[in-house]
Amino acid sequence: MTDTTPGHPRTTADWQRAAAGTLLERTGIELVEVGAERTLGTMPVAGNTQPAGLLHGGATATLAETLGSVAAQVHAGTGRAAVGIELNVTHHRGVREGTVHGTATAIHLGRSTAAYEIVVVDDDGRRVATARLTCMVLGTP
């Protein structure tokens, strides 16, 4: 998907390149689709586990906040910034291997805030976590 907002990365590949050297790169998060209404991404379980071998809840939260924040930044547009102000995550099941897939779906796209529900599933489509992210949109519209 392509973002047509001037000054923003224009394609999903551009967004991925912008993530070089960040937490996204270290966790292996890949953006699949980027848009204000919906953003999708994946993250490998390997390298993102707790000592017991399960996907770390913080890694799941990182995926959720990443997807919602990217979507909110697209919504914010050029010359504005979106910053997370609240994140909550409910973990439903553990994952030991494979990839998790997240979808951030807009709940509210306002002038000063944007809110997203982020659903994270495993390779078999089973829900791993549900998150909600609220971002404040800074700058003049």
Image: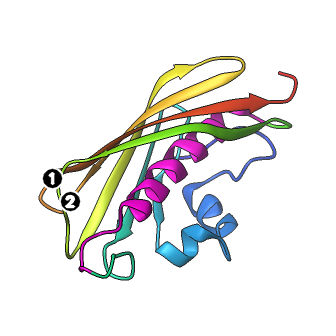
Quadrant where the C terminus sits is: top right
The tag on residue 69 is none
Q: Is residue 113 magenta?
A: no
Q: Position of residue 97 (x, y in %)?
A: 20, 76
Q: Relative to 72, does residue 61 appear above or below in the rendering?
A: below
**Which residue is drawn at the image coordinates 12% and 59% (left, top)?**
124
* Amino acid type, label 2: Asp
- State the image coordinates of residue 45 (x, y, percent, origin top left): 31, 74
Q: Nearer the viewer, residue 80 or 84?
A: 84
Left or right, residue 139 beside residue 33: right
The picture places residue 96, in percent across and down from the top left corner, at 19, 74
Residue position marked by numbered label 2 in the rendering: 122
State the CA–CA distance, disc 1 to disc 2.
Answer: 5 Å
Query: At 74% from the left edge and 34% from the top edge, which residue is drawn?
Result: 77
Q: Is residue 100 left or right of residue 95?
A: right
Mark 1 in CB contact with mark 2 (< 8 angstroms): yes
- Magenta stretch prevailing secondary structure: helix
Expressed as whole percent of the image width and height from the top left, the position of residue 127 reads 19, 48
Please, what is the three-letter code of the amino acid marked with disc 1?
Gly
Q: What residue did someone put label 1 on?
A: 125
Disc 1 residue crowd, few under 14, some 14–19, many 20+, Cα 10 Å? few
Local crowd size for mark 2, using a 10 Å CA cut-off: few (<14), some (14–19), many (≥20): many
Query: Left of 12 or right of it: where is 89?
Result: left
Secondary structure type for disc 1: loop
Magenta span covers which residues?
Answer: 52-77
Quarter where residue 11 is shown: bottom right
Residue plotted at (87% across, 23% down): 140
- In the image, residue 37 above or below residue 8: above
Q: Can you tell which quarter of the image residue 21 is in?
A: bottom right
Q: Is residue 26 above or below residue 86?
A: below
Residue drawn at point x = 64 percent, y = 67 percent: 19
Left or right of 35? Residue 53 is left
